[in-house]
């Protein structure tokens, strides 16, 4: 996940999903420094690799969109109308 160029190292974004993806971090003389830089920049370590803030927010937007869709469905479960009718019958 490190890019190497002219004896410089840079951590490459492993996600590359965002349109404005950083693609890679700053260039340093060592992999350690390159990794320290992304840690300071708050890149996210996914277990497979680091991904940049832009890709992270891309993921977050998709995640919240998915959550919202699921939330809508859970507001209208099957049988909700039945429960309401039962309640009305009980009042009568
Ligand atoms: Zn990225």
Image (cartoon, rainbow, N blue to C red):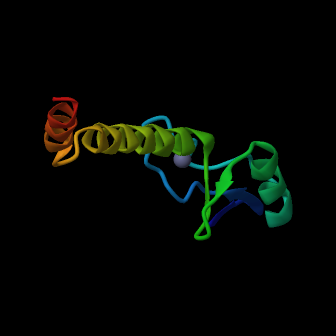
Q: Which quarter of the figure is the N terminus placed in? A: bottom right
Q: Residue at x 22, y 39 (%)?
A: 76
Quadrant assignment, res 19: top left
Instruction: In the displayed orientation, state which residue is furthest to the bottom.
Output: 48
How many numbered marks have been drawn onto this rendered protein structure?
A: 0
Name the foreground residue: 27 vs 88.
Answer: 88
Residue 3 locus on image (x, y percent)? 64, 62
Pinpoint residue 10: horizontal percent, then vertical percent. Answer: 70, 56
Q: Is residue 17 above or below residue 68?
A: below
Q: Position of residue 61 (x, y in %)?
A: 45, 37
Residue 82 appears in the picture as rendered = yes
Residue nearest the observer in this picture, 71 or 41: 71
Q: Residue at the location (61% across, 41% down)? A: 53
Apparent side of residue 36 relative to residue 57 in the rendered image (left or right) = right
Q: Percent position (x, y) of residue 67?
A: 39, 43
Can residue 18 be seen here? no
Q: Residue at x 62, y 69 (%)?
A: 47
Image quadrant where one finds the C terminus:
top left
- 80 sits left or right of 7 in the view: left
Residue 7: name its quadrant. bottom right
- Closest to the observer, 59 or 52: 59
Q: Residue at x 17, y 41 (%)?
A: 86
The answer to whether 63 appears left or right of 76 in the picture is right
Furthest residue toward front: 92
């Amino acid at each position: 996940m490190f890019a190497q160029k002219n004896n410089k190292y840079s951590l490459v974004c492993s996600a590359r999903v965002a349109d404005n993806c950083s693609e890679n971090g700053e260039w340093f003389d060592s992999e350690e420094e390159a990794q320290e830089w992304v840690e300071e920049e708050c890149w996210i370590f996914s277990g497979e690799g680091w991904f940049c803030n832009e890709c992270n927010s891309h993921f977050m937007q998709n995640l919240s969109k998915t959550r919202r869709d699921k939330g809508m469905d859970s507001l209208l479960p099957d049988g909700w109308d039945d429960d309401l009718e039962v309640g009305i019958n009980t009042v009568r």
